[in-house]
Image (cartoon, rainbow, N blue to C red):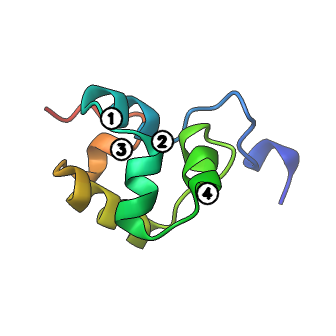
């Protein structure tokens, strides 16, 4: 895999942090809902790591949003 295929820290692949703010929720709250470490949620929110597709769907269910709302590049209303 070339360096061009790897997301840089400036790329915003997911919108998790934005959706949490919109819903007045915290990373700590989401970590508790998922049974995950807060540090993991923080990495997802900062886009330094990405949740699996299965986890993204689970997060969307918990937040009661379309999973596509959690991914940048989609303008789903």
Q: Is mark 3 on a helix, strand or loop?
A: helix
Rounded to the nearest whole Å, what is the CA distance between mark 4 and mark 2?
14 Å
Residue 67, how many percent across, how many down? 27, 53
User: At 24% from the left edge and 33% from the top edge, which residue is drawn?
Assistant: 23
Residue 19: mark = 1
Q: In which quarter of the image is the C terminus?
A: top left
Disc 4 target residue: 40
Disc 2 target residue: 14
Towards the viewer: 53 or 46: 46
Rounded to the nearest whole Å, what is the CA distance between mark 1 and mark 3?
7 Å
Residue 8, how many percent across, how many down? 75, 37
- Mark 3 vs mark 2: which is more N-terminal? 2
Towards the viewer: 42 or 14: 42
Disc 3 target residue: 70
Within 10 Å of disc 1 (Cα), the crowding (few <14, some 14-19, many 20+) is some
Circles 3 and 2, Cβ within 8 Å, touching? The answer is: yes
């Amino acid at each position: 895999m070339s360096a061009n295929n790897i997301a840089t820290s400036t790329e915003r692949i997911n919108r998790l942090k934005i959706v949490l703010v919109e819903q007045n929720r915290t990373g700590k709250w989401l970590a508790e809902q998922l049974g995950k470490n807060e540090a993991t949620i923080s990495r997802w929110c900062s886009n330094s790591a990405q949740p699996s597709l299965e986890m993204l769907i689970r997060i969307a269910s918990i937040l009661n949003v379309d999973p596509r709302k959690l991914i940048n590049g989609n303008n789903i209303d």
